[in-house]
Image (tube, coloured by chain):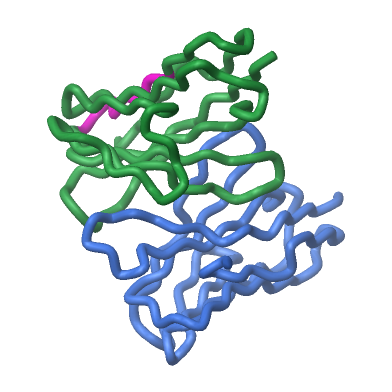
Chain colours: A blue, B green
Amino acid sequence: TQLLEQSPQFLSIQEGENLTVYCNSSSVFSSLQWYRQEPGEGPVLLVTVVTGGEVKKLKRLTFQFGDARKDSSLHITAAQPGDTGLYLCASDRGSTLGRLYFGRGTQLTVWP
Amino acid sequence: GAVVSQHPSRVICKSGTSVKIECRSLDFQATTMFWYRQFPKKSLMLMATSNEGSKATYEQGVEKDKFLINHASLTLSTLTVTSAHPEDSSFYICSASPGEGRGTQYFGPGTRLLVL
């Protein structure tokens, strides 16, 4: 079973549209990370959220951590073709060893 | 800063041969390195945790004799896929962490392995 459930699995939109992707779990997380991965490359860290209810903004990207620290969302405003990629959420499951476990990801395609 | 490299970037080998993949932290010392495997259009699956100077810790279901990990220095970890078979074809990604335990992981660019 997947600890982190991401939805939707695929998202194809036109440039300029807004979108939200979700990362949900039945477990409480001490922290959660969002990554973006492009084909043939390793994932790149976008943000780490730690506090329940926390909202972080990174230009057109807004990340929110649920109050109960069981879910998170990523909202992109006015999507651009450069936003295309695989968006992954990950958590360390409370491990002190730093091991990360990833969700299945949301494959986003933004058409010009 | 915080650059992690992998070599080779892609490799094609015959079934039954062994392949070694290197992961290097270029501008920091990595006490801990991690190895992941990713199938096409799928997520990253943690294979093992590699600590400098000690044996790697493997995730459940990962064969330690199949995937040999060596973390000989604070800047280098290697993953050797022994007696590779077509089902081992995958994208292998490493990450490195400057500190022990929790901390930011910096990911390498990945190695594409194709076993014929």
Q: Relative to B1, is A47 on the left or the right? A: right
Instruction: Please tell me which residue is depicted at 86% across the width and 59% down the height of the picture.
Output: A14
Magenta-drawn stretch contains B48: no
Rendering coords of residue B107 (x, y %): 42, 39
Magenta-drawn stretch contains B26: yes
Q: Relative to B21, is A73 on the left or the right? A: right
Q: Quadrant of residue A54?
A: bottom left
What is the residue that sits farthest to the left in this orientation? Answer: B53
Instruction: Please tell me which residue is depicted at 76% across the width and 49% down the height of the picture.
Output: A81
Rendering coords of residue A71 (x, y %): 52, 80
Q: Is residue A55 above or below residue A97?
A: below
Q: Is residue B29 above or below residue A9?
A: above
Q: Quadrant of residue A105?
A: bottom right
> In this picture, which residue range is highlighted in magenta?
B21-28
One can see residue B12 in this view? no
Rendering coords of residue B8 (x, y %): 49, 15
Q: Relative to A16, is A48 on the left or the right? A: left
Q: Is residue A48 above or below residue B21?
A: below
Q: Quadrant of the N terminus of chain A?
A: bottom right
Q: Main secondary structure of the magenta part?
A: strand
Rendering coords of residue B83 (x, y %): 51, 16
Instruction: Please tell me which residue is depicted at 61% across the width and 31% down the height of the picture.
Output: B90
One can see residue A19 in this view? yes
Instruction: Please tell me which residue is depicted at 36% across the width and 63% down the height of the picture.
Output: A92
Of residues B46 and B64, the one drawn nearer to the viewer in this rendering: B64
Of residues A25 and A65, the one drawn nearer to the viewer in this rendering: A25
